[in-house]
Image: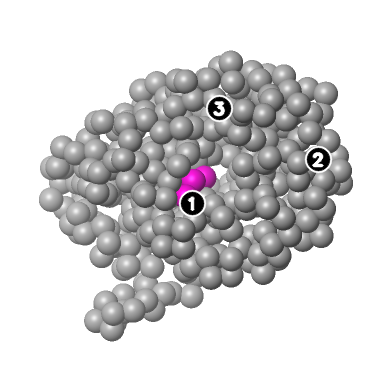
Amino acid sequence: MRIKSVQAWWVRIPIEVAKQHRSDFGQVTTFDAAILRIETDDGLVGWGEGKNAAGSAGSYGALVHMLNHEIAPQLIGRDPADIGIIWEMLYNGVRHETAAHAGHAMPQLARRGMSVAAISAVDIALWDILGKALGKPVWRLLGGRKVERMQAYASGGWAPADAIGEQLKSYIAKGGFKALKMRVGAMDGAPHISAARVRAARKAIGPDVDLMVDAHGTYTVAEAKRFIKLTADLDLAWFEEPVIADDKPGMAEVRASGSTPIATGESEATRYAFRDLAMQKSADIFQPDPAFCGGISEAMKIGTIASAFNLRFAPHLWAGAPCFFAGLHVCAASPASFIIEYSLGANPMIHDLVEETVEAKDGMIAIPEKPGLGFTISERFLEAHAQRI
């Protein structure tokens, strides 16, 4: 079995006005992603996803060009089952043979950001192909699944203080969720405004529902510490991305300032960044995004680091179907995982891009049973929303 073709598209799906929301990323009017299709010479197709933009909207022209014109030629003719070998080849670039013989990484200079986003898309698609070739779901190939269904949390929460309670309660009514996440930070301005919204949320949902908050890295260290103090009595399940991801010492300072668990990692790429988070005691919960951190292969390694440091693992899954399903399989197989992110914002990249129905029931998400990642892309829908670049 050999790779015959590789094709990526920038897929941009408009979000109807009634379902749009505004956050620190502005008004979200589209859902965008780089979607990758890899086909083998015996007709198997694997689907992957790469991300290089914050939130769910952004420009993917450069990433798609990289996948089609730089990555694709390196993949044609290779055995798609050589997943780890291909990962290291793409990461180390022209020095990959030297690195393989030496037994340690010698990455090309552009070893983060878009380069790893491209590797992520390839890696996810190759795992999809391997599962289909063997007739097994990917979680089986990763070591098995610990549960058939896993708890999910409803991810949303942009409403002002006088409406946030009703917004979050609508999530509970919709999917039976027992855990909810809301946004805070620069979208509100000062920390006391966000704290007032969180206090209103807790009052509305009561003490028995887990409540998480996400600042998208928009606070300074001082502001984040202030927010923790203002919300110390609200029993937050975690405080996500309190400060910019590049400031790991600052993240550690925020973590040490109170008892609220710190979650982070959606902006981090590769096991090396998460090693640093662990060593600097910057986080309690790792949140790698499979479409950015390095794919399924790297997400599993990151989960192992979390387990080794007695931390927890909850991947960032505000994403399209290939990334979301990849996260389901990784969570099923990782000993450190405990909860799955489920977008309650408009997400046509999950719900309309695939033939299957993706939903939470009683606050739980089922782990796929089908071979590969377990979804069927609607190629007609994909082609209707592929950008011409």
Disc 1 on helix, strand or loop?
strand
In the picture, residue 252 is in which quadrant? bottom right
Please provide percent x and percent y for residue 164: 75, 26
Q: Which residue is mark 2?
A: 195
Q: Which residue is mark 3?
A: 178
Q: Residue at x 61, y 63 (%)?
A: 282
Please check the rendered image and state whether residue 46 is part of the magenta-colored stretch, yes or no. Answer: no
Mark 1 — residue? 312
Label whose residue precedes the other's in the sequence (1 or 2): 2
From this view, report whether residue 373 is shown above or below residue 304.
above
**Residue type highlighted by circle 3:** Lys
Q: Residues within 10 Å of mark 1 (few under 14, many from 20)?
A: many
The answer to whether residue 5 shows anywhere in this view is no
Region in magenta: 312-316
Relative to the observer, which residue lies in front, 27 or 147?
Answer: 147
Residue 131 position, x and y percent, is: 21, 42
Q: Is residue 268 visible?
A: yes
Q: Residue at x 46, y 24 (%)?
A: 360
Callout 1–callout 2 Cβ contact below 8 Å: no
Q: Secondary structure at mark 2?
A: helix
Q: Give the residue drawn at x 46%, y 32%.
A: 151
Query: Against 192, is 347 above or below?
Result: above
Main SS of the magenta part reads: loop
Nearer to me, 17 or 176: 176
What type is the residue that disc 2 sits on?
Ala
Which colour style is shown? one colour
Q: Is residue 70 left or right of residue 112?
A: left
Q: Give the number of callouts.
A: 3
